[in-house]
């Protein structure tokens, strides 16, 4: 089904773009809204100002009212969801109702749906599928190459255009890439793009980072925005430019200033993470790595093996929770366990040395601690973790961490893993 996407849009009058995600299942948290994020990234790539994202349930009245409100403040609305054949698929009719416009059947679309479902013959028993063929009279159709529900491009009033997509991510992406992207770019883009470069920092807090870059936070182009998660802080540098090469030139001096301020803490950029950085560095050195895990229970191994190519450096691990296995598998002496306890600097060091020797590796990381919520004491509270790293010269670096005991078990485990990997990164950096 061919789609002719023409539009008399006036690029000079652009006020902004909004994304509307439709579906009660989104409000209930039954599914994660990945569509809005993907669309936001696509809009940034063509330099469109994206001001608002909204999620609404399957209610015709509320949906129509929201569409009306959006038409007063934005030029372009992109919707996902609610285009199917079921009673709660209300998007097209609610949009038409918002502007008091009738819907008309498009017979060629019905013929197309029947062809797509010819083998299943499901349309014979389910004529509600024909609901997907009704559109406002002057709406242009966006073909759906992967499903039965087409979308539309419709300008119900001057300087306001709506594009509708199904909620199924694969269908939405295919429709966007096949036709909608070029339509939006040619009718709404001013020829600029947004380009971002994200620096990733570990072992430093967001407040400290923000304090150090106060003079940069008010920049207009490029802009800098800090974002914090449990394990890291991200500094996203964003600029608007005519091309990627121009954008990189605009970003360069800001990036260099940040790299100078946070040289010790920046471990990577954009899609890089600590495991990928470590694997690349160990491959360069032709060195191997093993783990001895107690309180992290395999999470450290899971992190490193989540990266394709990890087998080139990672040989394996020993997960030894009990004292018996620490002694049996890692050769941790019983007198150390009895004297200092499993959560101690001495035992962590012995675990690292034992893993390195037993598994015949260049580098070894061990971790032992109290992840909680129970098991802590005055001397050894919840959140106490010992890390030991032994290298090719058989010297061991010992690290003591005391995480906030109010954190939950998973958070303490994740922080422990992050500090294990980042500590090795810093050691490798100092040994260059």
Image (cartoon, rainbow, N blue to C red):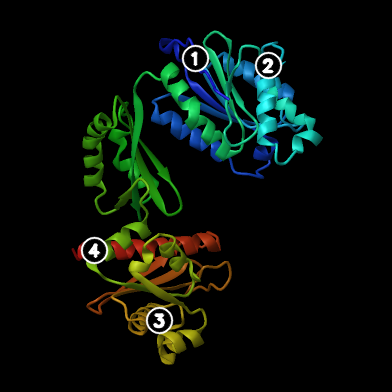
- Contact between marks 3 and 4 (CB within 8 A): the answer is no
Foreground: disc 2 or disc 1? 1
In primary-sequence order, the first of circles 4 and 1 is: 1
Q: CA distance from mark 4 to mark 1?
A: 53 Å
Image height of 414 relative to 189, above or below = below
Please give the residue where the numbered disc 4 appears in the rendered image: 284
Instruction: Name which quarter of the figure residue 219 lies in.
Output: top left
Please give the residue where the numbered disc 1 appears in the rendered image: 6
In primary-sequence order, the first of circles 3 and 1 is: 1
| Quadrant including the N terminus | top right
Image height of 201 relative to 181, above or below = below
Please give the residue where the numbered disc 3 appears in the rendered image: 347
User: Element under label 1?
Assistant: loop
In the visual, does 425 lie left or right of 175? left
Q: CA distance from mark 3 to mark 1?
A: 71 Å
- Whether residue 83 is visible to the viewer of this picture, yes or no, is no
- Contact between marks 3 and 2 (CB within 8 A): the answer is no
In the image, residue 351 lies at what x, y percent? 39, 80
User: Element under label 3?
Assistant: helix
Instruction: Name which quarter of the figure residue 31 lies in.
Output: top right
Please give the residue where the numbered disc 2 appears in the rendered image: 96
User: Element under label 4?
Assistant: helix
In the image, residue 127 lies at what x, y percent? 79, 30
Residue plotted at (74% across, 27% down): 130
User: Element under label 2?
Assistant: helix
């Amino acid at each position: 089904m061919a789609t002719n996407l023409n539009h008399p849009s006036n690029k000079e009058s652009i006020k902004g773009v909004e994304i509307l995600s439709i579906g009660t299942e989104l409000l209930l948290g039954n599914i994660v809204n990945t569509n809005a994020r993907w669309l936001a990234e696509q809009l940034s790539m063509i330099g469109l100002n994206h001001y608002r994202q909204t999620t609404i349930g399957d209610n015709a009245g509320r949906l129509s009212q929201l569409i009306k409100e959006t038409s007063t403040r934005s030029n372009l609305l992109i919707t996902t969801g609610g285009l199917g054949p079921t009673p709660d698929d209300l998007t097209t009719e609610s949009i038409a109702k918002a502007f008091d416009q009738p819907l008309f059947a498009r017979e060629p679309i019905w013929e197309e749906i029947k062809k797509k479902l010819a083998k299943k013959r499901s349309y014979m028993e389910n004529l509600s599928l024909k609901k997907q063929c009704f559109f406002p009279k002057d709406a242009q159709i966006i073909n759906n190459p992967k499903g039965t529900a087409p979308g539309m491009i419709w300008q119900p009033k001057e300087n306001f255009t709506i594009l509708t997509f199904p909620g199924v991510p694969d269908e939405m992406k295919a429709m966007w890439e096949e036709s909608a992207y070029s339509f939006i770019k040619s009718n709404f883009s001013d020829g600029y793009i947004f380009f971002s470069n994200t620096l990733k920092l570990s072992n430093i807090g967001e407040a400290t980072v923000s304090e150090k870059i106060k003079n940069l936070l008010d920049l207009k182009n490029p802009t800098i925005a800090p974002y914090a998660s449990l394990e890291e802080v991200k500094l996203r540098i964003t600029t608007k430019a005519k091309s990627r090469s121009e954008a990189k030139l605009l970003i360069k001096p800001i990036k260099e200033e940040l790299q100078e301020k946070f040289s010790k803490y920046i471990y990577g950029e954009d899609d890089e993470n600590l495991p990928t950085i470590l694997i690349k560095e160990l491959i360069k050195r032709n060195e191997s790595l093993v783990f001895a895990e107690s309180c992290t229970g395999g999470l450290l191994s899971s992190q490193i093996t989540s990266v394709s190519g990890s087998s080139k450096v990672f040989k394996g691990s020993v997960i030894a929770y009990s004292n018996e296995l620490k002694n049996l598998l890692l050769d941790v002496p019983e007198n150390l366990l009895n004297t200092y306890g499993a959560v101690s600097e001495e035992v962590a060091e012995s675990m690292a040395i034992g893993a390195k020797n037993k598994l015949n590796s260049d580098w070894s990381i061990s971790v032992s601690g109290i992840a909680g919520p129970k098991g802590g004491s005055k001397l050894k509270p919840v959140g106490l973790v010992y890390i030991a790293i032994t290298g090719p010269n058989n010297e061991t670096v010992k690290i003591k961490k005391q995480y906030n005991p109010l954190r939950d078990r998973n958070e303490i485990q994740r922080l422990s893993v992050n500090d294990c990997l980042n500590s090795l990164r810093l050691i490798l950096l100092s040994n260059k």
